[in-house]
Image: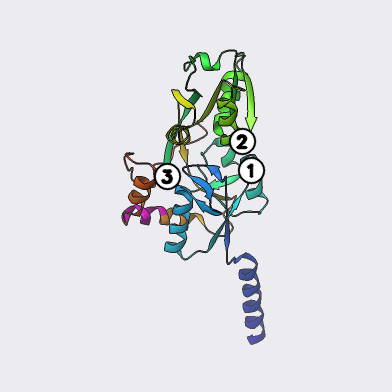
Amino acid sequence: MLRRWFLAFILAGVAVGLTAKEVFVVGLDAAFPPFTWVEGGEYRGFDVEVMRAIAELQGLRVEFRDLPWATIITALAQGKIDIIASGLSVTCERAKVVDFSLPYWEVDQAILVRKDSDLNAITAFLGTKVGAQAGTTAYMWLEDNLVAQGVKVELCAYETYDMAVRDLEIGRIAAVLCDVETAVGFVEAGRNVKIVGIVKTGEQYAYAVTKGDPYSLLPRLNEGLRKLYELGIWAELVAKYFPGRPVEPVPLVPRDPCR
């Protein structure tokens, strides 16, 4: 009996060893301010600070890894990273391959054109070249609502939004579609662009983990969001990165992305 108990104990210890991790790798797009970016060799931004705060509250160790946005879902599915925290919108397609935390942010899409452009929210998408970052919901919206519907527009995919805005500034494309906060960030940074319209997509951002949540991270992420709000840390971070924006209680009420 003792030998069987000892063997069971050893096997249980092996199983724990196989699933335990000392450090969780957080994947992000390091060119997506104000949520994530690199400055002086350090990862910065709203999502970076939120993840560090949650890790401290929940007793986790995290490190960050910059990845091309178009590959970040695949990287999570392949186990190259453990969490995505970089302004990731919840979609029906993504929910099939990753598991989402409770949502923490709501966002629409903004239409950017050059400051000296006469284009508006309609003409920016008619017979023009429009840019968006590959793999983003903005790019998907352009594909589904313009290209697939036969609208005469040329869709240009970019690795980062900074590259798209650079092409917009020098006249290679006529418009860029991106999340509102990102668009505001480009305008406030003094880039040669302006916002001429908002596409009401009503998206929700959430953090994502590997399908099946093998390390039981979702309960800790969700509880971490609640604690950040209750302790007032959430309000401080919102004021720091989004001055003047109202502070909504988090987590938000999730919407069904497949409806």
* Cα distance in 3D space between marks 3 and 1: 23 Å
Q: Are marks 3 and 2 in contact (CB under 8 Å)?
A: no
Q: Badge 1: few (under 14), some or many (20 or more) residues near its Cα, within 10 Å?
A: some
Classify mark 3: residues with Cα within 10 Å, few (<14), some (14-19) or many (20+).
many
Front residue of 90 and 163:
163
Does the residue at mark 1 contact the one at mark 2 (Cβ under 8 Å)?
A: yes
Q: Do the residues bearing badges 3 and 1 touch, measured as CB atoms within 8 Å?
A: no
Task: Read off the magenta span.
Answer: 225-230
**Residue identifier under label 2:** 135
> Foreground mark, 1 or 2?
1
Tell me the amino acid under the disc marked 1.
Pro
Which tag, 1 or 2, sits closer to the chain's start?
A: 1
Is residue 85 visible in the rendered structure shown here? no
In this orientation, which residue lies closer to the viewer: 176 or 135?
176
* Image disc number at residue 9: none
Q: Which mark lies nearer to you, 3 or 1? A: 1
Residue 34, compared with residue 201, is above or below; it is below
| Depicted 168 relative to depicted 220: above or below | above
Looking at the image, what colour scheme do you see? rainbow
